[in-house]
Each structure stands twice: as C-alpha cells, then as structure tokens.
Image (cartoon, rainbow, N blue to C red):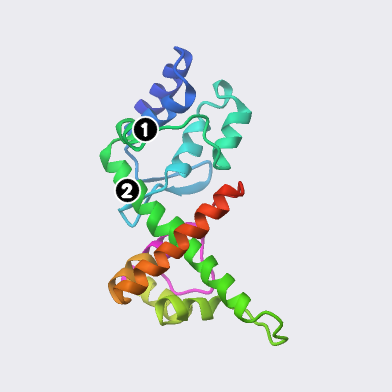
Amino acid sequence: MTEAIEHLRQSITEGKHWYLALLEAIGLWQLKEETFNGRHHKYLIAGEAFDLLLLAQRLCAEADDIIPESEKTDLFFGKLPMELSKEELKSLIGSAKYRALLNYFYGITVERTLHLAIQMEMEKELSGNIHRRDLDDDVFHRIYDSSETSLLERFRKENGYTQCDSIVLTELDEFTYWLFKYRFANCERARVASDTKKALKLLEEIQQDGIHF
C-alpha cells in the first residue's frame, strides 16, 4: 500500500502524467480490501472482479494536492484524460488485475445494464396500462427464472451472510456478480448470449449519451 502511494506521488512530482502514474500505482496495490476514513473498501469482489474505479478514488485521495481537480472529477464520471489501448492498460496495471477488471465489467457493469434493459422492455410492454407496478421482481423472473428474494437468500446462505431486509453497496456488488455467474451456469446458452448482447448494446448507447455507471 505504502509503495503504491509513494510511487503515485513521486511519479507525478517528477513529471509523469497523473493518470499513467495512477494506473501504475494501481498495479502495485496489494490489498484486496481495507477500511479507509471510516468506510470499508472492497476492491476485489468475490476474489475475481476488480473495482478499478474504487481503488482509483482511494489513491487519488492520497494525491489530492497534485492532481488537477477537474480532470480527477471527469475520471470519476467516466471521462478519461487520455485514451489507452487494451495492451497499454494491461501493461500498466498488470495482467491479473486486467483479467479481474474484465470480470467486473461483464459481471457487474454489464449485468446491471441487463437489468435496466429488461426493465425498459417491460415498461414498454406495459405502456398505457393503469395497473403499473414495481417491476423489480418481474425483471428477475425474466432474466433468472426466479425471484430476487429467493436468489438473495440463496446467495447469502452460500456466502454465510446474515439474512436481513437491507443490503449495503459492497454486498450488492457481490450479489450482482453472483447473479452473473448464476445466469451463465443455469440459463440456456442462446438466451445468455442474447441477453448479454442486449446489455452491451444499451451500455454503448448510454455511454454515447455521456452517462456512465
């Protein structure tokens, strides 16, 4: 942890672009989770999915005085200060973190977008219907052939988590990744491919509109 922070500050001070220094520091980072400023940070979800943005926020807090505020804010809203190829990114953060980053993208970002895509489909189907209702459970049934309550209970039981009425963000990320793996293991392959394609298409449209998850 100390090595990564020192590398970040020293590299920026010596003239390296802060974004490149940040990615190198991410590559050096070793902790999978920690409590920082009273908040629990879990950077590696289910031991497989790497939340790069969360770690970037954590590291930027250590170099607030030497990173341009506007560029840092843009980064957290999905606007990168420079374009990098996949190979350049992999080289900067390391192959293992890059693979885990792809797991996060498909297992959490794309899976959440799939929920939105199905919800939008169902809202369109119900357009003009005066008996509109909360569609969350309908979305789960359409994607996973099961209710959200049932799947959340199963997820918590498998992971030894307490069954309760609320869910914190860290657990929600884990649950979303678990749903991704559940869908691939239990749903028909053609349907999995179709749903994933649908989510990727919507995500591309959302990002073109300047909206980022």
The amino acid at mark 1 is Met
Q: Position of residue 70 (x, y in %)?
A: 63, 30
Q: Quadrant of residue 145?
A: bottom left
Place residue 69 in its image quadrant. Answer: top right
Evaluate whether residue 51 shows in this view: yes
User: Residue extending furthest bottom?
Assistant: 131
Query: Crowding near pointer 2: few (<14 within 10 Å), some, many (20+)?
Result: some
Drawn side of residue 170 relative to residue 98, left or right:
right
Determine if the magenta segment contains residue 213: no
**Of circles 2 and 1, which is in front?**
2
The residue positioned 41% from the left and 62% from the top of the image is 197
Q: Is residue 90 left or right of residue 211?
A: left
Q: Say above or below: 53 vs 8.
A: below
Residue at point 51%, 66% (across, down): 167
**In contact (CB < 8 Å): disc 2 and disc 1:** no
Question: Is residue 91 or residue 33 the one in the foreground?
Answer: 91
> In the rendered view of the protein, which quadrant contains the N terminus?
top left
Q: CA distance from mark 2 to mark 1?
A: 19 Å
Callout 1: few (<14), some (14-19), or many (20+) C-alpha neighbours within 10 Å? few
Of 7 and 85, which appears nearest the observer? Answer: 85
Please state which of residues 156 and 189 is positioned toward the viewer in this rendering.
Answer: 189
- Taking 116 as reference, is 87 left or right? left
Q: Position of residue 179 (x, y in %)?
A: 39, 68
Q: Which residue is mark 1?
A: 1
Q: Amino acid under label 2?
A: Ala
The residue identified by callout 2 is 100
> If you read the primary sequence from the N terminus, does the residue marked by circle 2 or circle 1 appear first?
1
Q: Is residue 99 above or below residue 171?
A: above
Which disc, if any, is residue 158?
A: none
Magenta span of residues: 158-177
Quick one: SS at disc 2? helix
